[in-house]
Image (spheres, rainbow, N blue to C red):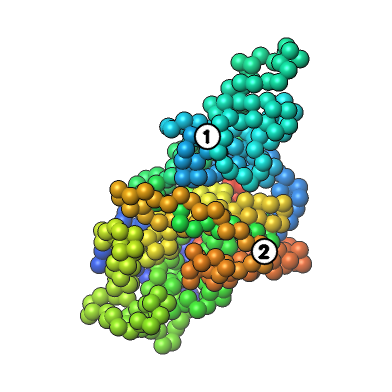
Amino acid sequence: MSELKNLKPGEARCPDHPSTKELVSRDCTGAPDAILEESYEFIGDADIPFERYISKDFAQEENNKMWSKVWQWACHVDHIPEVGDYYVYDVADLSAVIVRSNNNEIKAYYNSCLHRGTQLKPSGTSGVCKELKCPFHGWTWSLSGKLEYLPCDWDFPHVDKEEYNLPELKCDTWGGFVFINFDQNANPLNDYLGVLPEHFKNWNLEDRYIETHVTKKLPCNWKAAAEAFLEAYHVLETHSEGVYTAGDANADYDIFGDHVSRFIHTIGYTSPHIVENRPSQQEILDILLGRKLDDNSGTVKVPEGSTAREVYARIVQEEMGEKYKSDFSHLTVTETIDSIEYFVFPNAFFFPGLQLPMVYRFRPDGVDHAIFDLLFLRPKVEGEDHPLPPEPHYLDIDDSYTLCEGTGYLGAVYDQDTNNLLSQTRGFKASPKGAQTLGNYQESRARHLHQIVDKYINQTKN
Ligand code: FES
Ligand SMILES: [Fe+2]
């Protein structure tokens, strides 16, 4: 403990255990440079007021100054594969309609008629159309945004059709996802994404399709929802069954600029919280395989000099290779099995791993409710058509993820995560302290999220 006392804030790490980067370097496959890149600095330790989660005024500030300024993924290119396909994306008070205007072009429009404001397409819908016709009086725009029909145009001599193009939002794609920005002056998406394109350059997110999509309503502010997935500190208590195979307290956290942060926690390393009777490599493998194969546990041996992680990764590569008709043997152990999670401010999460290939998105739904989209991506088979995205499986606040088959064994894990959120929100309101106290390292990404929210809110521009 005396050694720890000499460290500056933020310098302490889980004692007596290798960090995740040390662990993945020891794998027989090594690890990609992106995974080994380190980027952490101490960003403060002041308490963060609960007001930020429950105040209507604060939420309004976020709506006005943050949601209207940030890049956010609205849909996937596979949601709008054909000309005329559209998808409505809503966030806070904002709404956009994203349209495939021709084979090579996607456009995003403010979802509001230039006549009397009606939404051109209802919230939460998607479909196909030949043009964008307002359902109120029928003003009609082409897919490329030109005003083509104005009923009784004799009554509108003051409307020059040439000047009544639908206002466009900034729109771009990355990794197969369509991103939009409601700010006309926004910097390009590629700048916003920071290290993400470089880190993902060999992970080919665009070569994956959406296999599962679950949309759940959560009883908490959107930030509390996102933060529940920004740290592995909660694994010990919330996912206690996972401690024999999850490196939680020795997980790595990195912050790359304003908009990207990351954690990596290992699968196949026993939690540092387990001090006595730590399982052997063979026992770890048995647990991992027991979860995966049920009746087959114990039949695969960890060879001398190898680890449970290495053997498990090879099994996952073979099984998934068979299932998705691909060869994954080039992947390192960490890319195959670990929980590698990139967060893109304010609300998107991308997991490049093979076994844990999730994408998340959290949006506000009023002050203390949020909408959580959970996707599982799978590799496309070369030369074959891939499935189009399934209709989202909608879950209400009290519905279990286990109702959705596509989530597999992770359904119960997502239930554990989301079951904390109502109590946390109630606790925010009941707290005499009125603020949260975060860990300097393990919860740095949550603090960073708040700091970037403030950066947008305090911007003087516009
Ligand atoms: S409000 Fe759209 S046509 Fe009238
Ligand atoms: Fe969790």
Give percent across and percent down for residue 156.
74, 15
The answer to whether residue 190 shows anywhere in this view is: yes
| Farthest left residue in view | 304
Residue at image location 56% in from the left, 31% down from the top: 130
How busy is the neighbourhood of tag 2: few (under 14 within 10 Å), some, or many (20 plus)?
Answer: some
Q: Nearer the viewer, residue 301 or 221?
A: 301
Mark identifier at residue 397: 2
Q: Earlier in the sequence, mark 1 or mark 2?
A: 1
Name the side, left or right, on which 427 lies relative to 106: right
For residue 265, above or below residue 140? below
Q: Can you tell which quarter of the image residue 23 is in?
A: bottom left
Q: Residue type at mark 1?
A: Gly
Mark identifier at residue 84: 1
Q: Disc 1 vs disc 2: which is toward the camera?
A: 1
Q: CA distance from mark 1 to mark 2?
A: 34 Å
Instruction: Identify the secondary structure beneath mark 2.
Output: loop
Instruction: Identify the secondary structure beneath mark 1.
Output: loop
Q: Nearer the viewer, residue 246 or 74?
A: 74
| Farthest bottom residue in view | 277
Q: Can you tell which quarter of the image residue 44 is in?
A: bottom right
Give percent across and percent down for residue 309.
33, 72
Residue at image location 59% in from the left, 37% down from the top: 97
Give percent across and percent down for residue 270.
41, 77
Q: Nearer the viewer, residue 330 or 163?
A: 163
User: Which quarter shows the C terminus?
Assistant: top right
Give percent across and percent down for residue 231.
52, 63
